[in-house]
Image (cartoon, rainbow, N blue to C red):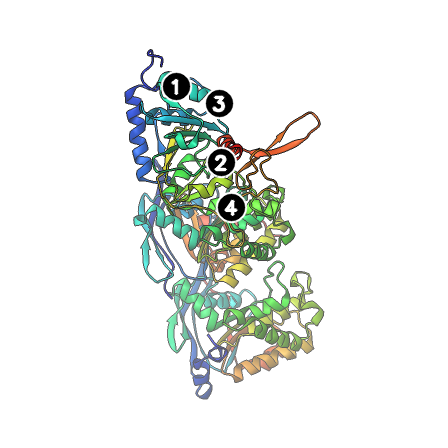
Amino acid sequence: MSALLQVRGLSHHYGQRIGCQDVSFDLRPGELLCIVGESGSGKSTLLKTAAAQLAPSAGSVRYRQRDGDWLELDELSEANRRRLAREEWGFVTQNPRDGLRLNVSAGANVAERLMALGMRNYGQLRDIARGWLERVEIDPSRIDDAPTAFSGGMQQRLQIARTLVTQPRLVFMDEPTAGLDVSVQARILDLLRRLVNELGLAAVMVTHDLAVARLLAARTMVMQGGRVVETGLTDQILDDPQHPYTQLLVSSVLTT
Amino acid sequence: MTAAALSGSAIAASATSPSPMLELRGLGKSFELHHQHGARLDVLDNVELTLHASECVVLSGPSGAGKSSLLRVIYGNYRPSRGAVRVRHDGDWLDLAEATPHQVLEVRRRTLGYVSQFLRVIPRVPALDIVAEPLIEAGLSTPEARQRASALLHRLNVPERLWQLPPGTFSGGEQQRVNIARGLIVSRPLLLLDEPTASLDADNRVVVAELLEEARAAGSAVLGIFHDEDMRDRVATRLFPMRPFQIA
Amino acid sequence: MTSNYNFAFLDENTKRMLRRALLKAVAIPGYQVPFGSREMPLPYGWGTGGIQLTAALLGPDDVLKVIDQGADDTTNAVNIRRFFARVAGVATTERTTEASVIQTRHRIPETPLREDQILVFQVPEPEPLRTLEPREAETRTLHALADYGLMHVKLYEDIAQYGHIATSYDYPVLVDGRFLTSPSPIPKFDNPKLDHSPALMLFGAGREKRLYAIPPYTRVESLAFEDHPFEIQRWEHQCELCGSDESYLDEVVVDDRGSRMFVCSDTDFCGQRRAEQAA
């Protein structure tokens, strides 16, 4: 099976400081890859650079479009980059308030990407928005409520609905469950797991939570100091970690 | 992939003339513990084993002999330190010690099954869906997958009232039966079993033994650990003795 | 005319700068052209943008009309008209048909305009996306990429809240199929008059330092949904002075007991009709 995303030697530097350094990986359709590591390990920088939100200092990212053609993201115009981000990709931020439009209703938040794609039928937009609210377990009767009236967990589920409504092929997620209660977290993880399977999404997810990686991802990359120190099957990395840092990370997990 | 493809040409071909499905050559495993002053833990050395279609080899030996570790190395859960784990996958031989993660995942999906002692519970997912999931991943429709999962759970005497509940709160025996059902629902040419019957009563062990016999009759090769002697005698076609690793 | 000022108040270099910006605006219909807005002898919000455009356009032979909400006799209109009479010495009029330049706040005259007329709008906020997207760099990018899904978010919110598109003035339009544009706070009743207008329409925002144009005979569409099409306001009343049932009506309170009457907002239009009826 051919890859959907090809990352080669990708680096992003903040001035003299390393954000991420010389990272390579392939992502296939329908695959969820987790990037784990502690705060400051460069996970989010890598995610944003791979998603073309940050310009790479070195290296390349290639994406295979629906029509099978490869796009060099570096050579992409701003217009095409946005089109891609709108039509084929999604990005879920850690803080849902960053990913949502807080001054408009939940329904408008879900419908926005559809309107950006040119859908101009109000009735249809409402139907689709209601369907997605239901899918992310938000009462559809709250379609006209402002997201500010929602709990943190509901806001995150709303952001997921808003991102997935256009059925993207590739989703980037930056700690989507950090900062939420454990019970809320489980619900969102289950939801993501189900949606990723149902929609056949490919996804790259940043998390510092190894249990999240175990639950969702077949493959995992471990980052330290901006570099990937270990990569492979998630269960292998968690049960038989090779690198000193991964061993430390795994042995630091509290078990209940 | 269709349901017909699930039964696999590898099985069909090997059912007539028992052919090797798994070859372990010079297999060794050591753990290096970087945070325990670089201590090295040797668990397997120079394991040589050939497993044929339709046979059931049971690993025997005292605890600490590395039986579970061997199964985990074969499954790719542990990374082999030395030697080869050669698997017949889609008619070709593939060394899992050298394979890419994507290849290992593909082998796990279609060729190599693993049933451990414990069910890894996924929050909020009902037992029925946990069992049906491997079939859905293999391309079956959800209703058909659920139907087959129901049949299997029924056969394993999991009460129907539990099917729609997440197994987190089930008893050990119920969880184990859900785990077995999930592990055996897709017929794979190669099965690894790590004490799947440890907390089952006699009746349910018989059911598992029957399921394994059916898998073998369909051409699957089975490699397992069974501490219970009755169970071992009933399912094993051959024993593979292991002893704790000796430092040379 | 007061000779202490340069003709039409602004110095010639400023007028040249404005005319260049206006030419660019006409060349790219609906595109907001930045310009060096000057301090004018009236506060922001009173038409500093419109007045600078008018100053750059006026020649000695022009006839100027100024309306505020359709009326020629309100303070703002009277002051601006008198201002140009003093600093440019141009003729002024209240008759739409006689004017060559019409500066307006919040209305388009009912009387159809001609090719030899220019309408100058006073614009408080030139950016139609501003309430939804506060970042100027981002709205400019959205315009550059014609990425206008956001505007429909606002219309969606209207329908969700009120059951219909409740935006009744400053109703967003797409100019020449390309640039999303604010028509300034005119009632949406006037939006159809923007489409294929024979007269040149110029828009000036003094505080925001932007001007833009809708050249004659340009396609101007009001945004809408398929199942919630664009509609203009309708009244159950007729003008109580001239009897018109096709003009934009103002509701006026006429005494202390709360009595109201509906009259044409366009005073010239109303007056002409009454004069014809009397004749």
Q: Residue B77 in the image: x percent, y percent?
A: 48, 63
**Viewer-nearest of labels 2 and 4?**
2
Q: Tell if the residue under mark 2 belongs to the same chain as the one under mark 4.
A: yes
Q: Is residue C37 left or right of residue A201?
A: left
Vertical placement of residue B3 versus C42, above or below: below
Q: x%, y% of residue A57?
A: 32, 43
Q: Position of residue B33 (x, y in %)?
A: 47, 52
Q: Is residue A177 visible?
A: no
User: Considering depth in this image, is B239 or B103 the residue closer to the camera?
Assistant: B103
Q: Which of marks 4 and 2 precedes in the sequence? A: 4
Say whether mark 2 and mark 1 are on the same chain.
yes
Q: Amino acid at mark 1?
A: Ala
Distance, label 2 to label 4, CA atoms, is 21 Å
Residue type at mark 3: give it: Asn
Residue type at the position of mark 4: Val
Instruction: Of the two numbered discs 3 and 2 on the same chain, state the one appearing first in sequence.
Output: 3
Q: Are marks 3 and 1 in contact (CB under 8 Å)?
A: no
Disc 2 chain ID: C
Distance, label 3 to label 2, CA atoms, is 16 Å
Residue picked out by circle 3: C76
How crowded pointer 2 is (Cα within 10 Å; few <14, some 14-19, many 20+) is rated as many
How far from the left and from the top, in percent, is residue B217? 53, 85
Towards the viewer: B24 or B239: B24
On the same chain, marks 3 and 1? The answer is yes
